[in-house]
Image (spheres, rainbow, N blue to C red):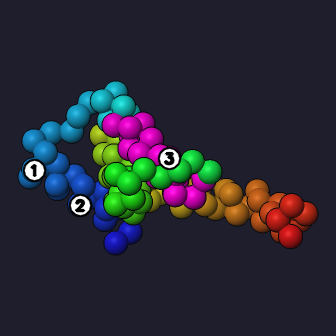
Amino acid sequence: MDIQDAQVAVDDWIKEHGVRYFNELTNMAQLTEEVGEVARIIARRYGEQSEKESDKAKDLGEELADVVFVVLCLANQTGINLQEAFDKKLNLKTQRDKDRHKNNEKLQ
């Protein structure tokens, strides 16, 4: 599934199960909450903080998918074709940074 197909799938889901989109500010708050959950897992599982027993069962993939879902909602409700935006951004980063990381001594 490409990004455009994912946007359609989310839109179909909202229409069938979600009644309507939350407004943009609510979705932005949701996105912040979901990113916080991802950060919590990464900080404890891969960082220096200890992981609580109750956090060990949390699925990082599921939490990342929550982030993607809300991003797709925001794109849909603001009229953004995220596939086009992503392709444009990847092309820009490729042109701008094509040698930057190869020449970074810290990454050698």
Observer-side mark, 2 or 3, equals 3
Q: Is residue 100 above or below residue 72?
A: below
Is 59 in front, or is 7? 59
Residue 75 visible in the current orientation: no
Which residue is at a point 34% across and 27% down the rendered structure image?
25
Q: Amino acid at mark 1?
A: His
- Read off the residue under disc 2: 9
Classed neighbour count for the residue bearing mark 1: other residues with Cα under 10 Å, few (<14), some (14–19), many (≥20): few
Observer-side mark, 2 or 1, equals 1
Q: Which residues fall within the magenta stretch?
A: 30-47
Classed neighbour count for the residue bearing mark 2: other residues with Cα under 10 Å, few (<14), some (14–19), many (≥20): some
Which residue is at a point 70% across and 63% down the rendered structure image?
94
Q: Are marks 2 and 3 in contact (CB under 8 Å)?
A: no
Which residue is at a point 77% across and 59% down the rendered structure image?
97
* SS type, badge 1: helix
* SS type, badge 3: helix
Position of residue 22 measured from the top left corner of the image (x, y, whole percent)? 23, 34
- Read off the residue under disc 1: 17
44 inside magenta stretch: yes
Quarter of image, res 59: bottom left
Q: Are marks 1 and 3 in contact (CB under 8 Å)?
A: no
Which residue is at a point 86% across and 70% down the rendered structure image?
108
On residue 101, the disc is none
Left or right of 26 in this view: 107: right
Report, in whole angstroms, how far the alpha carbon at label 1 lies from the one at label 3. 28 Å
Q: Is residue 108 above or below residue 71?
A: below
Residue 21 visible in the current orientation: yes
Is 22 in front, or is 86? 22
Q: Amino acid at mark 3?
A: Ala
Report, in whole angstroms, how far the alpha carbon at label 2 lies from the one at label 1. 12 Å
On residue 39, the disc is 3
